[in-house]
Image (cartoon, rainbow, N blue to C red):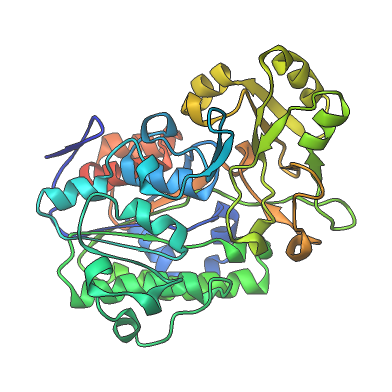
């Protein structure tokens, strides 16, 4: 047994592969059913259910939760940014120094298991590679890999093609394909693969573009399943359209609103913010707000009156409700409804790439995702999955402890 973050994981009897399909709401899989025969085979012989993500339903918090088996209050990662009031600085948390818990990948590696991880976006790779030495690389920078840093010399030769650009749907396909090639050519016990959500940000479930993408994923999911492995698939969040009737973003600029109402010191942090503005323009359905102590209640009152705002919680309420680290969220946490996103000020955002058709995530309505296994579960874990009580960060618990190999 391997112990990490108050959980025990059995050493796998055969290689385990965990996949996070970024932005994969169940609707995408349902709409592409006829184009995903391999996934249908996996589900038929294994197990499938719906699980909850962590809030905020963003990429980094959920991937870090999956690879630590813990919530953000333990692992320390509630988004891409927080505001350090003492330093008066908005801090980007892409550096693994902000992790407060070891990863399952590191624990397995330190126990002598051969571990590998492939991400599509490079922003996530250092988190996943923290604390262990083994094959790790991103599709985004696969052409720059070297033996010293990534423990692999030539990914492009391994896969047999150039790595696609980060805004190419094939980038995520390349990630899963690379996983299949790694299992063919390297001795791996534990493999984690994490895609990107460009397709889900740009195309609705059932659209030709989305269906083509999922059909391509299915090809390599089938290749993985054909190997003697234990395979588990989940997602970091879902995706919804966030538009008005004319197709423009349904955005409420809450920093501007608070400033106009006399709370001039209000600072809004949007933890979805990252370099990939083509995806979402830094607009999501979760925000944190920093105000003076005497303005916490007045600000909360103003925010609750904004159309599309669904919840406004104090720091303590948010910490308790969503298991968030209190020092890395604001005085208030704001969540919007299914079709609304939260912004800072109109001037702060570059909406060139999302002027129409914005799809995004971050709130409660993107916090339910599939979890799928290619082998049956034992009764206790099967009951948990069908009951809706399981979480996406239980993935490795299921892979190691929940599979029925009889």
Q: Is residue 193 above or below residue 163?
A: above
Tally of numbered tags? 0
Q: Find residue 299 and report its horizontal and vertical position in percent.
A: 76, 21
Q: Find residue 346 and report its horizontal and vertical position in percent.
A: 82, 48
* Observer able to see residue 49: no
Q: Quadrant of residue 287?
A: top right
Q: Decide which of 137, 184 is in the foreground and name it.
A: 137
Q: Is residue 356 above or below residue 295?
A: below
Instruction: Tell me: 51 left or right of 336.
Output: left
Q: Find residue 219 and report its horizontal and vertical position in percent.
A: 42, 76
Q: Decide which of 148, 43 is in the foreground and name it.
A: 148
Q: Quadrant of residue 27?
A: bottom right
Q: Residue at x 35, y 83 (%)?
A: 156
Q: Residue at x 46, y 71 (%)?
A: 140
Q: Residue at x 71, y 12 (%)?
A: 294
Q: Is residue 150 above or below residue 30?
A: below
Q: Find residue 258 and report its horizontal and vertical position in percent.
A: 81, 29
* Observer able to see residue 85: yes
Instruction: Tell me: 245 left or right of 18.
Output: right
Instruction: Tell me: 72 left or right of 85.
Output: left
Q: Quadrant of the N terminus?
A: top left
Q: Is residue 288 above or below residue 127?
A: above
Q: Decide which of 142, 292 is in the foreground and name it.
A: 292
């Amino acid at each position: 047994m391997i112990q990490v973050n108050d959980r025990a994981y059995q050493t796998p009897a055969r290689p385990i592969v965990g996949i996070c399909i970024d932005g994969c709401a169940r609707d995408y899989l349902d709409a592409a059913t006829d184009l995903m025969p391999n996934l249908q085979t996996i589900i038929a012989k294994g197990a499938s259910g719906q699980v909850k993500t962590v809030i905020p339903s963003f990429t980094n918090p959920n991937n870090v939760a999956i690879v630590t088996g813990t919530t953000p209050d333990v692992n320390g990662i509630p988004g891409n940014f927080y505001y350090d009031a003492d330093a008066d600085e908005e801090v980007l948390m892409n550096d693994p120094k902000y992790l407060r818990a070891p990863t399952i990948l590191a624990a397995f590696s330190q126990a002598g298991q051969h571990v590998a991880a492939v991400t599509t976006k490079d922003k996530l790779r250092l988190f996943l590679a923290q604390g262990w030495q083994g094959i790790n690389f991103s599709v985004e920078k696969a052409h720059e890999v070297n033996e010293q840093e990534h423990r692999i010399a030539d990914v492009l030769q391994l896969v047999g093609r150039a790595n696609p650009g980060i805004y190419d749907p094939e980038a995520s396909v390349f990630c899963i394909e690379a996983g299949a090639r790694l299992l063919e050519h390297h001795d791996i016990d534990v493999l984690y693969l994490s895609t990107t959500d460009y397709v889900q940000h740009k195309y609705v479930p059932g659209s030709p573009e989305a269906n083509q993408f999922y059909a391509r994923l299915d090809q390599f999911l089938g290749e993985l399943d054909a190997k003697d492995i234990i395979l588990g698939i989940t997602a970091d969040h879902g995706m919804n359209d966030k538009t008005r009737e004319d197709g423009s973003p349904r955005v409420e600029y809450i920093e501007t609103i608070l400033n106009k109402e006399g709370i001039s010191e209000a600072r809004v942090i949007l933890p979805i913010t990252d370099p990939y503005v083509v995806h979402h323009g830094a607009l999501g359905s979760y925000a944190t707000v920093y105000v003076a102590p005497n303005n916490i209640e007045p600000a909360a009152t103003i925010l609750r009156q904004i159309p599309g705002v669904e919840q406004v919680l104090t720091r303590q309420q948010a910490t308790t409700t969503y298991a968030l680290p209190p020092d890395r969220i604001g005085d208030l946490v704001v969540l919007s409804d299914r079709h609304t996103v939260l912004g800072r000020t109109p001037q702060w955002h570059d909406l060139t790439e999302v002027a129409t058709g914005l799809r995004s995530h971050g709130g409660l309505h993107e916090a339910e995702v599939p979890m799928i296994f290619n082998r049956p579960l034992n009764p206790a874990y099967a009951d948990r999955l069908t009951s809706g009580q399981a979480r996406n960060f239980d993935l490795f618990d299921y892979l190691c402890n929940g599979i029925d190999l009889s």
